[in-house]
Image: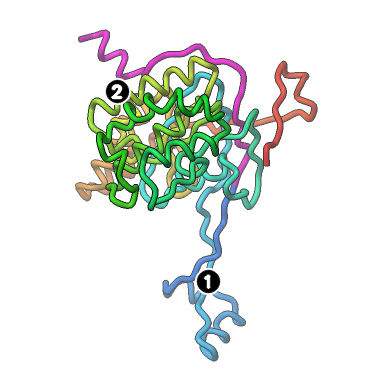
Amino acid sequence: MGANADAVKKGVEVTLGEPSVVVDGVHQVYRSETTDRNARTRASWSQKLAHVLVRRPIKEDVHAVDGVSFVARTGESIGILGLNGSGKSTLLRMIAGVEPPTAGQVYARSQPTLLGVSAALVPDLTGMRNIQLGCLAMGLSPKETKAVTPAIVELAGIGDSVYRPMRTYSSGMGARLRFAINAASRPDILLIDEALGTGDATFKKKSEEVLTEIRRDAGTVFIVSHAAQTIEEMCTRAIWLHHGRMIADGPAYDTARAYRYWAWKVAKGETEEAARVLQKTMDHFTPVELDLIDGSEERGHVMHREW
């Protein structure tokens, strides 16, 4: 019982290596329409005039990600926690290079693979045909694709549905197939957004084994999930985002438990206790200060900006 508990608290430990991803003070600001009366009060006179004369919507800046910095190393499995709108998926897309940050920089030692983006699947084609196309799109040869197909089918665990068009799949089945295809290429940096919360215990166990293999091969894994338990079980480190800001970065078990307790208090309407937990978490967190050096061979590794 004790050994199993330790495994849950720490995830599968893998020796850490050199930095694989550096996120240096990134911001993401969106210009969005709003009907908030306070926003109308804050609007400039020209915005107010345009709103009255031509019914132009009032717009304001929304800080989806606000000054996030951290360093990820090979062998790490990093969970990203936070409520809807906290900036989790936005941060993942910036790491992947899908959308550039408004300010700040993201550096990576290789091109990250964002689950569901690198393998562009076609709804009208069967799962089997999408496996073939997805593997080829990620750079596998026809021979390699044929070799890994049985393992992809087994990991996805969708049975005979693999021979039917993907448009007939549930969202969970589609997510599991995407994960299996992406994992087959053993990416150096794998970014997963909610896909692991869609399967049963067997799928979760198999996917954890695959992610551990990637990390042991000197890879890095990021997992975004609303389920704190998923982060506890599958990650060694967790980052908690709140309104776009990083308020915690530490061992997955401790961070996920703190987040779960806070979310429970919020759900029960115990706002004072929730605020106390949030403040305590923020008080114990010290943001990392990066001092990046051009020509990073001096630090014993070569980092480059991929995008």
Q: To which residue does mark 2 refer?
A: 205
Assign a secondary structure to mark 1. strand
Relative to the observer, which residue lies in front, 302 or 25?
302
Horizontal side, residue 34 vs residue 137: left or right = left
Which residue is rendered at x = 80% and y = 26% of the image? 295
Cα distance between the residues tagged 2 and 1 = 46 Å
Q: Residues within 10 Å of mark 2 (few under 14, many from 20)?
A: some
Horizontal side, residue 53 vs residue 264: left or right = right
Residue 246 in view here: no
Relative to the observer, which residue lies in front, 195 or 139?
139
Residue 14 in view here: yes
Relative to the observer, which residue lies in front, 198 or 132?
132
Q: Position of residue 39 (x, y in %)?
A: 48, 71
Which residue is rendered at x = 44% and y = 17% of the image? 213
Q: Residues within 10 Å of mark 1 (few under 14, many from 20)?
A: some
Split into 4 quadrants, where in the image is the C terminus? top right
Horizontal side, residue 164 vs residue 303: left or right = left
Give the residues in magenta.
1-26
Which residue is rendered at x = 31% and y = 14% of the image? 7
Q: What label does residue 59 carry, if any? A: 1
